[in-house]
């Protein structure tokens, strides 16, 4: 899993201008970034009904969680299976701060991000000496531990019943209930834009390059002076902040919290988004989040067949395109571009 | 006295189930180097197949072994469809996690569609109850406590005394060398999965004999098996077996003294602490191999 584009998918334009392997020129990326998110911002004009907007809001939340997971899983190469716990911590931090401590929802939203970051730093400590499969198991254990603590403290957290009537966000005197979900739509979109911008700047920075170096050749990176302890902690902390905020937003939007967010099924869905999109891309996870969320809704009538069809689809894509949807798009783009350039 | 007997019995019983599950996980990890997240689903499927065969009128003595054999086939098919095609990929560990999770979800929802969500129960190995040391226990549970070590011993004999078992250990130790001496590595991968699946299926049959079955019954034992293999060290067979019983006793003692709610939290706490001191598990040597 390297960052280099394989020769097959290298388009002719890229081959002509030598740049760092796998890196799009930043101007090109900036244009794509602005255009992509501008298109998303126009979507409420097309989708007037609240149901379609609800699906999009959920897709935005999943996209934030999945793309941040891609930072630690794809770029960092840390097999972190506790990422959903950070999301859950965001959900519960926001719920408890607003409901019990009567914090302002916006302050609670930000504080949830900070709390998730602190939790990520805490979970990094036991995995500093570990590798591969053991990291999966410990981080998985961490998620279970957080869930068990929430269940056992049922006086405060509501236990398995969860919490209801959590204060929502507000924008001045705007009525968030009767605006057809447009305020929540734009808040979710703004969070996704901020998160994506942060992630892309981070992975393009020196710190981002050093965590990729650690992933690809640990011994060499260490010998070049990259600190595995510091970079691993940085990676997990960086991936936690917006995940926690996404959790807080989820709680504010749904107005309730339950331990389902720690469950295997949500983790599986989000993990599928990361891997289906293609790891180490950030955008792949976001695209896959849209695809899977909309696909799941589209198949809502299929009942028990829905998870089965989704499972077959995921296996199919993973077997055919190990680099995920982004790899698939690149490959088909390469094929199309190649045919256009070459006279038949 | 009765407290000690209760912990001892509970530990032995839970430990047996965990050992049956954990050995399969460890076997697949040592030979193929992947982690099978559909292992819990194997357990569920084994129980349901046994239930279906009993329902069709087969005596339990025939239905249970047939279900175990069918599970070996299921394990082989799963390996051939979602694991083997990925071998050689650089990020295989991660991709196999998602393909086995997806396959697990497929089987779980398939079971839900075929058999429905209503709880079922299969006949106990031996019906009846007895009292040992002031603790009431069922004969079914005693049968499990006795049978499990025999099965694990048989597996140990197979791995250490037969040519096929030695071939499996060879693949676990050095895959390239195994290819060179002419071993059919692909078939051995399938064998490892088949053994793992049938052991999990058997654990499911054991569990279905004293507790109601449901399509999600495998997820909690899978979680415990994960803890066991981490705790015992994943790169061996004996480590997870010892760890399974140790965790069984720990869990029985915790739920006796601290209550059921705190047991999982304490378990994970101990797990994380252990890994900080011994990252390779408490019983594991640093080399990868089957013993």
Image: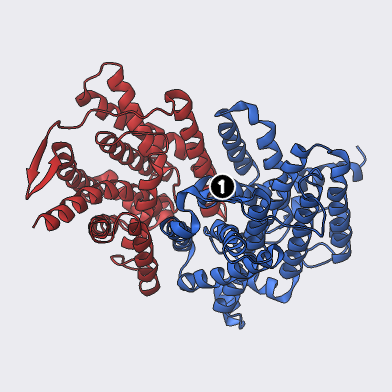
The answer to whether residue A246 is left or right of residue B244 is: right
Q: Residue at x 51, y 54 (%)?
A: B93
Q: Colour of chain A?
A: blue
The extreme right residue here reads: A343
Q: Is residue B254 above or below residue A57?
A: below
Q: Which residue is mark 1?
A: A266
Q: Residue at x 82, y 54 (%)?
A: A174
Tell me where residue A334 appears, x and y as whole percent: 81, 47
Q: Quadrant of residue B71?
A: top left
Q: Is residue A31 above or below residue A120?
A: above
The answer to whether residue B24 is left or right of residue A218 is: left
User: Mark 1, chain letter?
Assistant: A
The extreme top residue here reads: B57
Q: Which chain is red?
A: B
The answer to whether residue B100 is left or right of residue A205 is: left
Q: In terms of depth relative to the viewer, which is nearer, B216 or B5? A: B5
Q: Quadrant of residue B194?
A: top left
Tell me where residue A274 appears, x and y as whole percent: 64, 52
């Amino acid at each position: 899993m390297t960052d280099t584009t394989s020769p097959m998918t290298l388009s002719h334009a890229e081959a002509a201008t030598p740049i760092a392997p796998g890196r799009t020129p930043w101007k090109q990326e900036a244009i794509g970034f602005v255009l992509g998110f501008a298109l998303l911002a126009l979507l409420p004009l097309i989708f007037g009904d609240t149901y379609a907007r609800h699906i999009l809001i959920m897709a935005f939340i999943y996209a934030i969680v999945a793309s941040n997971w891609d930072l630690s899983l794809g770029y960092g190469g840390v097999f972190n299976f506790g990422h959903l716990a950070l999301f859950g911590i965001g959900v519960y931090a926001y719920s408890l701060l607003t409901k019990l401590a009567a914090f302002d929802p916006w302050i609670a939203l930000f504080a949830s991000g900070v709390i998730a970051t602190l939790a990520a730093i805490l979970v990094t400590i036991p995995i500093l000496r570990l590798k591969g499969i053991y990291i999966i198991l410990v981080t998985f254990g961490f998620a279970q531990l957080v869930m068990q603590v929430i269940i056992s403290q049922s006086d405060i957290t509501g236990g398995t019943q969860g919490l209801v009537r959590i204060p929502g966000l507000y924008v001045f005197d705007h009525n968030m209930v009767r605006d057809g979900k447009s305020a929540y739509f734009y808040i979710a979109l703004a969070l996704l834009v901020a998160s994506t911008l942060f992630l892309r700047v981070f992975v393009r920075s020196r710190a981002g390059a050093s965590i990729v170096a650690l992933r690809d050749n640990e011994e060499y990176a260490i010998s070049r002076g990259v600190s595995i302890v510091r970079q691993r902690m940085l990676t997990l902390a960086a991936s936690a902040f917006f995940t926690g905020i996404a959790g807080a937003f989820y709680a504010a939007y749904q107005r309730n919290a339950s331990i389902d967010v720690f469950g295997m099924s949500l983790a599986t869905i989000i993990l599928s988004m990361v891997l289906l999109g293609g790891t180490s891309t950030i955008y792949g996870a976001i695209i896959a989040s849209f695809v899977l969320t909309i696909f799941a809704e589209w198949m809502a009538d299929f009942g028990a067949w829905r998870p089965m069809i989704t499972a077959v689809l995921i296996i199919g894509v993973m077997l055919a395109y190990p680099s995920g949807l982004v790899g698939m798009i690149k490959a088909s783009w390469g094929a199309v571009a190649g045919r256009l350039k070459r006279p038949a | 006295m009765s407290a000690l007997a209760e912990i001892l019995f509970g530990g032995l019983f839970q430990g047996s189930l965990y050992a049956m599950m954990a050995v399969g996980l460890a076997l697949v990890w040592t030979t193929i180097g992947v982690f099978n997240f559909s292992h819990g689903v194997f357990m569920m499927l084994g129980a349901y197949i046994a239930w279906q065969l009993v329902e069709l009128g087969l005596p339990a003595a025939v239905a249970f072994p047939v279900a175990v054999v069918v599970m070996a086939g299921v394990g082989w098919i799963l390996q051939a469809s979602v694991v083997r095609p990925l071998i050689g990929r650089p990020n295989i560990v991660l991709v196999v996690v998602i393909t086995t999770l997806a396959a697990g979800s497929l089987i779980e929802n398939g079971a839900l569609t075929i058999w429905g969500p209503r709880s079922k129960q299969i006949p106990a190995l031996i019906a009846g109850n007895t009292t040992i040391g002031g603790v009431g226990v069922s004969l079914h549970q005693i049968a499990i406590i006795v049978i499990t070590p025999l099965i694990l011993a048989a597996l140990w004999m197979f791995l250490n005394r037969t040519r096929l078992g030695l071939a499996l250990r060879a693949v676990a130790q050095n895959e390239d060398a195994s290819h060179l001496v002419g071993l059919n590595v692909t078939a051995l991968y399938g064998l490892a999965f088949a053994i793992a699946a049938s052991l999990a299926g058997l654990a499911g049959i054991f569990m279905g004999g004293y507790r109601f079955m449901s399509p999600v019954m495998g997820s909690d034992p899978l979680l415990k098996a994960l803890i066991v293999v981490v705790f015992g060290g994943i790169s061996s067979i004996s480590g997870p077996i010892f760890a399974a019983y140790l965790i069984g006793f720990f869990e029985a003692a915790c739920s006796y003294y601290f209550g059921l709610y705190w047991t999982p939290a304490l378990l994970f706490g101990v797990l994380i602490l252990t890994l900080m001191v011994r990252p390779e598990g408490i019983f594991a040597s640093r080399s990868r191999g089957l013993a």
